[in-house]
Amino acid sequence: MEDKMGSECEGPEMSLVCLTDFQAHAREQLSKSTRDFIEGGADDSITRDDNIAAFKRIRLRPRYLRDVSEVDTRTTIQGEEISAPICIAPTGFHCLVWPDGEMSTARAAQAAGICYITSTFASCSLEDIVIAAPEGLRWFQLYVHPVLQLNKQLIQRVESLGFKALVITLDTPVCGNRRHDIRNQLRRNLTLTDLQSPKKGNAIPYFQMTPISTSHCWNDLSWFQSITRLPIILKGILTKEDAELAVKHNVQGIIVSNHGGRQLDEVLASIDALTEVVAAVKGKIEVYLDGGVRTGNDVLKALALGAKCIFLGRPILWGLACKGEHGVKEVLNILTNEFHTSMALTGCRSVAEINRNLVQFSRL
């Protein structure tokens, strides 16, 4: 496949000390079309860029003369303990950037003790991902197919393989206008292994990138709840109105997300949308965030504004492109260490001590 990079980074070892270092190094390793696929946003990429910039508009209010000799970054999501509130968001086609793709990502997540959300558009099978990291905490992200039976078969397979939650993406009734992918004539028939049955003679047709349901609505959530015991998380909510509906329909969590700025451009940055969503749910369900997190301070700010956990998208692919499993481990380790430092420097000994008093935020 011409879009794949080589299996090893060439040349002398580069000092990679922050997530943007990995971004710069990954750009050197990837083909233009793959690089554009990962980095691209919708239309003018205003939301993609604002996801990052919005964090930098928030200022911290540290507290001092507190004993921070021991700082604990552990927390829980949906009742499962994770080593830090830093997990892996669903992104597709990891084999574009590293030969064994999502298997490396899953191993890194397992080693770090955090959650990995596997994408519908994974390039490795669910079975291979589970074999690669059998003890890892895994959720599964679903793009709803217009044929309900395909959704049901996939969800039952996910549940039987030990995935712990179902994440339903809401913000893709149609694909955003991604100019780079159009210019590059990105292939529309990349293999999606998870959308075929592992049993011969009972094959589910391959999912293509286009057949995502344009008609599923809030009332359809009851059907999903009827076919699975997994907690259901809704990904892509940006408004209090939709957050209130999520609570009304008895889901277990929300991921505040604008799809990395890849769907509808000129929507709120994720961190700017977080506060109204958190206020709307009134503590009844857990709220998470993805989009724009690049430093430990960003993680701290998201938690201070009410997120239970953040999910990383592009930075995971940067790590994978640079060093495979080891690169993903490094990205997670760097961000966790930065978060640990941010906690200590703001006087927080545990995640439970992080609160809104730590930030100065104009929308509060």
Image (tube, rainbow, N blue to C red):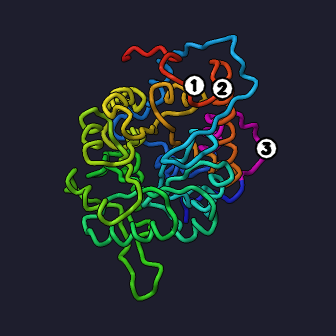
- Looking at the rendered structure, the secondary structure element under dot 2 is loop
Can you give x and y, in whole percent of width and height, for residue 203 in the image? 39, 81
**As shown in the figure, which amino acid type bears the numbered disc 2?**
Arg
- Looking at the rendered structure, the secondary structure element under dot 1 is helix
In this picture, which residue range is highlighted in magenta? 9-27
- As measured in the structure, the alpha-carbon distance from the residue carrying label 1 to the one carrying label 3 is 39 Å
Q: Residues within 10 Å of mark 3 (few under 14, many from 20)?
A: few
- The disc at residue 349 is 2
Q: Earlier in the sequence, mark 1 or mark 3?
A: 3
In the image, farthest residue toward the bottom: 201
168 within the magenta span: no
**Circles 1 and 3: CB atoms closer than 8 Å:** no
Q: Is residue 349 left or right of residue 193?
A: right
Provide the residue designation for mark 1.
353
Provide the residue designation for mark 3.
13
**Circles 3 and 2: CB atoms closer than 8 Å:** no
Can you give x and y, in whole percent of width and height, for residue 80 in the image? 55, 49
Q: Earlier in the sequence, mark 3 or mark 2?
A: 3
In the image, farthest residue toward the right: 12
Question: Is 363 placed above or below 327 here?
Answer: above
- As measured in the structure, the alpha-carbon distance from the residue carrying label 1 to the one carrying label 2 is 7 Å
Q: Is residue 100 left or right of residue 42?
A: right
Point out the frontmost of discs 1 and 3: 1
**Circles 1 and 2: CB atoms closer than 8 Å:** yes
- As measured in the structure, the alpha-carbon distance from the residue carrying label 3 to the one carrying label 2 is 35 Å
**As shown in the figure, which amino acid type bears the numbered disc 1?**
Glu
Query: Looking at this view, is 121 or 273 the one in front?
Result: 273
